Amino acid sequence: MEACVQLGRERLTCRTAFDRESPRRTVTLDGFYVDRFEVTRGQFERFVAASGHRTTAENDGGGWVPRPGDGWVKVRGATWKTPGGGNGERSAGAPVAQVSWYDAQAYCRWAGKRLLTEAEWEKAAAVRTAASTRGVTNGRRRR
């Protein structure tokens, strides 16, 4: 399921920014489509089965996992199948994790879609945040 977000002139602003992210600029965005929900593990599994794709984490022997007190640590075996490196969320309906930009790009090509630009992503995130504060969650009004 998709939702169309029509955009016009938008000023990008950040509460925090790295030095390389300045100066702020004004960008004009055309309307674009964005999926209403994150890509699930089940969807990603169908992509892998159909394409034979190996993720960056699989090729590297593991991925980065947040650990309280330690920050992000490299964990052997952490992949989209086992995001924490062993145990963790394995439901087909859960959002896929341990997917790099390259993996996401490959999935999008396979699915006939594309990744959002940074400006589109920021706008979509702002729209979703505004919707959730108005009582809408995942496209459905909260009761």
Image (cartoon, grey):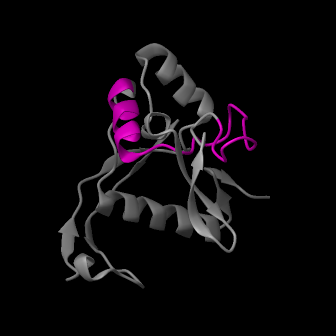
Residue furthest top as drawn: 50
Quarter of the image with the C terminus is bottom right
Provide residue 5's location: percent of width, then percent of height.
Answer: 39, 53
Which sits in the foreground, 45 or 66?
66
Which sits in the foreground, 100 or 8?
100
Please tell me in which quadrant of the rendered image residue 71 appears. Answer: bottom right
What's the residue at 56%, 64% (across, down)? 72
In magenta segment, residue 106: yes
What's the residue at 53%, 61% (across, down)? 128
Which sits in the foreground, 56 or 141?
56
Query: Would you place residue 75 above or below residue 9 in this image?
Result: above
**Is residue 7 at least partly visible in the picture?**
no
Query: Would you place residue 112 above or below residue 6 in this image?
Result: above
Which sits in the foreground, 73 or 34?
73
What's the residue at 53%, 35% (across, down)? 1
Provide residue 29's location: percent of width, then percent of height.
Answer: 24, 60
Q: Which residues are magenta?
A: 82-110
Provide residue 7's location: percent of width, then percent of height.
Answer: 31, 60
Instruction: Tell how many labels.
Output: 0
Please tell me in which quadrant of the rendered image residue 77 appears. Answer: top right
Provide residue 6's location: percent of width, then percent of height.
Answer: 34, 55
Residue furthest right as drawn: 143
**Is residue 57 at least partly visible in the picture?**
yes
Could you tell whether 35 is left or right of 24 in the image? right
Query: Would you place residue 102 above or below residue 125 in this image?
Result: above
In magenta segment, residue 22: no
Could you tell whether 67 is left or right of 55 in the image? right
Magenta: predominant secondary structure element?
A: loop
